[in-house]
Image (cartoon, rainbow, N blue to C red):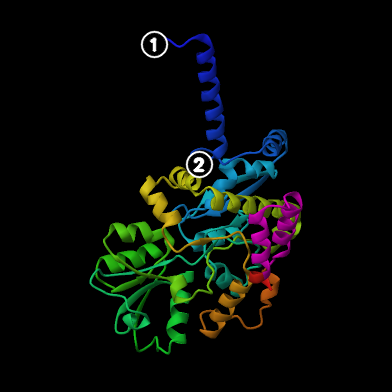
Amino acid sequence: MTLNWKKACTLVLAVIMSATLLTGCGGTGTPASSASDAKAKDKAANKKLDPVNMAYNPATGNILGFIAIDSGIAKEEGLDIKLIPFTNSTDALNALQAGKVDMGVSFGTIAPLTIITQGADFTIFGGYVSGGMPVYGRPDIKYTGLETFKGKTVAVARMYTPDLVWRGAMVKAGYDLSKDVKIIEFKKPAEVLEAVSSGKADIGIGTNSTYLQAVAAGLNIMTWTNDLDPMHVCCRPVANTQWINDNPDLVKRLMRAWIRSEEILINDPEYCVKLNMKYMELDEKQSRQMLLETNQIFEADPKSEGVRYMWQMMGELNYAKTDGIDFEKHINTSLYKQALDELLAEKPDSKTLQMFAERYQKYND
């Protein structure tokens, strides 16, 4: 039956209102935007943007950076973030030290700290990932605790955070790494995966960059690094200290973008799954696994207590020579704190930002 004119108008109006509401929800597109957000985006379109050449590992990802770029937050903060891919920490941090990139974001904690012990003037100034690095082994190995490693051949990637975390957990539990296990050291996480897959090693201390490949190879994900040691942090934004000192306002705006991106990650994870699909070229299942179904904890906070903890562990285990180096010259939490305080002043009723402020006190006292 044909609708009369009044009914047709009512139907069209309802459809328009529904479409508007769905767009505002942000669950399947870009995140929800308020009127003030729209004004900020209009203003950002005419703003001069400061370039930030950001090194990252495409196999590990950079979800806070992806969000900042894709949502327009980076431009709103006056930043033009350019993602520069590196497949391993050594090449990325060498490029950083040489000034070929401005900062690195997904290269662990131990790699930059080790290079600091070798003379690099790096500073860690924000947060990204804690935990979530897989420990995998042959399918027939049943994990019952640290005793599972005894008598096994364990493959590790030297100068990668999971290696130090595992060694520290074993030593704290009273094991002698020179007698109770056989350790095979490699330069890259991909070599660790190959060693376990080929039977050269029983267990691999892996990284998030090889997680999906380990699952695809049929290996047993035995445990996670933050189950071995809940205190440990991993990937941290790091830059040359001089670059930070020369560009404090830029770095503060970058931390604003980082914090705002974490807000979106918390409030709209489905949007972020789609971003991982886009930027990491994953299918939806893989993207969901990487982002939501591992033990990775994504936080913009510098978590300086966790970084200090890792530095102390490096020295105690003789992993690197930390004597005579003032660690406090290589950690900067003030620009993150300034960014957080500004955002709280702009949105004092935000429960998420209030939580971030409480978390900052816990992580950085």
Quarter occupied by the N terminus: top left
Task: Write down the quadrant of residue 199 in the picture.
Answer: bottom left
Q: What residue span does the magenta drawing correspond to?
A: 332-361
**Secondary structure predominantly adopted by residues drawn in magenta:** helix
User: Which numbered mark, 2 or 1, is in the foreground of this view?
Assistant: 1
Q: Please provide percent x and percent y for residue 170.
A: 42, 83
Q: Please provide percent x and percent y for residue 158.
A: 44, 72
Measure how far apart labels 2 and 1 are at the Cα level.
36 Å
- The answer to which of marks 2 and 1 sits earlier in the sequence is 1
Q: Which residue is mark 1?
A: 1
Quarter occupied by the C terminus: bottom right
Residue drawn at x 64%, y 45% is 74
Does residue 135 appear left or right of residue 47 in this picture? left
Graded by Cα atoms within 10 Å as few (under 14), some (14 to 19) or many (20 or more), the crowding at tag 1 reads few
Q: Please provide percent x and percent y for residue 187.
A: 42, 68
The local secondary structure at tag 2 comes to loop
Question: Is residue 353 rendered magenta in the image?
Answer: yes
